[in-house]
Amino acid sequence: MGVLAFLIGVVVMVIGLGVSIALHEIGHLVPAKRFGVRVGQYMIGMGPTVWSKRRGETEYGLKAFPIGGYISMAGMYPAASADAKAPALAGAASARETRRRSIYATLVQDAQAANEETLDGVDASRTFSGLSVWKRVVIMLGGPLMNLVLAVVLFAVLFSGIGMQQATTTVSSVAECVLPAGSTATECADGDAAAPALAAGIEPGDSLVSLDGTAVSTFAEASAIIQANPGRPILVVVERDGADVTLTLTPIENRVEVTADDGSTSVETVGYAGITSSVERVREPIWAGPQAAFENVGAVVQIVANLPARLYDTAYDLFTGGERDADGPMSVVGVGRLAGEVAAADAPIMDRVGVMVSLLASLNIALFVFNLVPLLPLDGGHILVALWDGVRRAFAKLFRRPPPAPTDATRLVPVTLVVVVLLVGMGALLFAADIFNPVQLLGG
């Protein structure tokens, strides 16, 4: 049963990833067709095609590996004029310099040739590069925004539909005694002082209504009042069997170590009662999900901003066997493995469903942020090129000059190739780490 549940979890995550990719590409496809761009292909996955069907001028299909997708638009780059194409080598240069220029020129020429093929028989108005700047930005931004919308929906389902586990104001258990500081005992002994909550008459099943005259709606609010009143008697109102009961609680002094935001620690004296709350799944307001999604965006942005250091740590942990950071980058293998472990875990079904939804929502946040990195071939790179064109046109208009030709991004193909190689290398590292030194999210 455990193996079957694990496989079900993996399959569910693979399907979820496929849907996320499909919606991402639809985010590109719909505005592209709306603006009249000729779209030759809409493909989900990478590798060999396992199924495809042509509808109108577009071929729709699935590929073997659900690790990406794409749409093929006519004229992703503008047509290169004769004098704009990669120039022939001229002048004296060293053999090494000549080879370097030759490789660069070859890459650019190949990219221009491939781009020219998409322009054959297509009117300039139906090419991506022939669109206005804002339309190009809308098309490229549509994919990441679909992932953000999906993440917001999933987080809303998680927070407001399934609910989040929270400590409630209902008392789950009451400690019998106060164990001496530093004691390793697990049971009360003769002479141990009774816990304040027990002495006050608080019982399991009581629901905390107010403490020291302040109404409480969460256990965190009740704990804060208890901790703020060491050694001082306070009135506690609990609901028991449908009626309010007023009790007197005197929290004892308890010394705890507190860590400040700057990492420094100090010892503070706080109140202790000996109450444990019950944990229930609570549905939160509808805005809690979107708020969590945007907080998650900030966290992922920090991860991407520190990606080189994070990858170094991942590589170091891989080769030394160190424990990986649960908040660090993972490949689809790692996410699928976590999904399988969650599905096979010995936990209530709604707890497992909640974690799966959270994983899929976080994955879509990662797709949203990563695709907006301003480097080709990512969506953010195409947006940057379009915005650069907009800036150039604005300056030309300001100084009453003729509109400049669209930026020939094929000349960035060598840089794009470097980015692709780095992405492949990053993927290989994360694949290896997720296989040989996986993140222990649920414990070893």
Image (cartoon, helix red, strand yellow):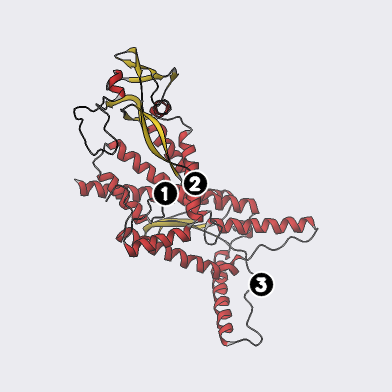
Q: Where is residue 192 in the image (x, y as percent from the top left)?
A: 23, 28
- Under mark 1, the amino acid is Leu
- Position of residue 348 measured from the top left corner of the image (x, y, whole percent): 26, 36
Q: What element carries label 1?
A: helix
Question: Upstream in the sequence, badge 1 or badge 3?
Answer: 3
Which residue is denoted by mark 3 in the rendering? 84
The answer to the question of whether label 3 and label 2 lie on touching residues, with beta carbons closer than 8 A, is no
Given residues 389 and 190, the one toward you in this image is: 190
Image quarter for residue 435? Answer: bottom left
Q: Work out which quarter of the rendered image holds the N terminus and state it.
A: top left
Spatial CA distance of label 1 from label 2 is 30 Å
Say whether disc 3 or disc 2 marks the residue closer to the N-terminus. Answer: 3
75 horizontally vs 41: left or right? right
Which three-letter amino acid code belongs to the residue tagged 3?
Answer: Ala
Would residue 119 be found to the left or right of residue 211 on screen? right
Q: Position of residue 344 (x, y in %)?
A: 25, 45
For the point 47% across and 44% down, the residue is: 296
Q: Rate crowding at label 3 as few (under 14), some (14 to 19) or many (20 or more) other CA atoms within 10 Å.
A: few
Numbered circle sitting on residue 262: 2
Against 207, residue 13 (above or below) is below
Residue type beneath disc 2? Asp
* Whether residue 342 can be seen here: yes
Q: Can residue 47 be seen in this view?
A: no
Count of all numbered marks drawn on residues in the image? 3
What residue is pinned by disc 1? Answer: 363
Compared with 342, 426 (above or below) is below
